[in-house]
Image: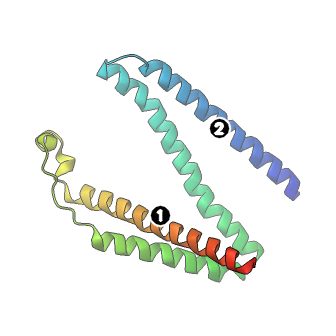
Amino acid sequence: MSEATIKRILRIALWVLMGVSVIFAAVFVAQIYDTNNRELQMNATEPILIWTYVLLAIAAVAAIIFPLIQVVRNPRNALKLLVSVGALGLVILISYLLASGDPIKVATANSNPDFSNRTVLLTTDTGIIATYIMLGIAILLLAYTGVKSMIGNK
């Protein structure tokens, strides 16, 4: 298959995913609009959560398969891929080591066991801290490239 055909297929697939997402969002908003019925809100939330899981699975598969295709096409990129995966692993390890996992003391802690489940709290803390670290790195890299381009253009 030619590269133009692959790009066209991917573009169509992305538009289909976007269209389905917009439909799910519109149905969700229509179902919960101007209602305080908690049961109705929960029933409206379930399909959009399932669609979110489907999109997450598609993104995870794409994030694994496309770099592998690139490595097969150009083996020199394997080292860059390994460095990137190692850096991501390091960020997650640092985030895990910084996560506390202490029980949350709130009024609903007795009715929801996740507020005192150490595994859930460690996983959640790790994800939040990793997001903060990667956001900080992204902002620093953005500032660095901006300053570098300003200096380089003079």
Which badge, 1 or 2, comes first in the chain's sequence? Answer: 2
Split into 4 quadrants, where in the image is the C terminus? bottom right
Q: Mark 2: few, some, or many residues within 10 Å (few <14, many ≥20)?
A: few
Type of amino acid under label 1: Leu
Q: Nearer the viewer, residue 25 or 8?
A: 25
Residue 1 in view (yes/no): no
Q: Position of residue 37 (x, y in %)?
A: 31, 18
Type of amino acid under label 2: Met
Whether residue 19 is situated above or below residue 112 in the rendered picture: above
Q: Which residue is the site of mark 2? A: 18
Q: Mark 1: few, some, or many residues within 10 Å (few <14, many ≥20)?
A: few
Whether residue 108 is situated above or below residue 29 in the rendered picture: below
Circles 1, 2 touching at the beta carbon (< 8 Å): no
Q: Nearer the viewer, residue 148 or 118?
A: 148
Q: CA distance from mark 1 to mark 2?
A: 25 Å
Q: Position of residue 144 (x, y in %)?
A: 58, 75
Residue 135 - label: 1
Q: Position of residue 13 (x, y in %)?
A: 72, 43
Q: Position of residue 77 (x, y in %)?
A: 69, 79
Split into 4 quadrants, where in the image is the N terminus? bottom right
Mark toward the viewer: 1 or 2: 1
Q: What secondary structure is found at the residue carrying circle 1?
A: helix
Q: What secondary structure is found at the residue carrying circle 2?
A: helix
Q: Residue at x 76, y 46 (%)?
A: 11
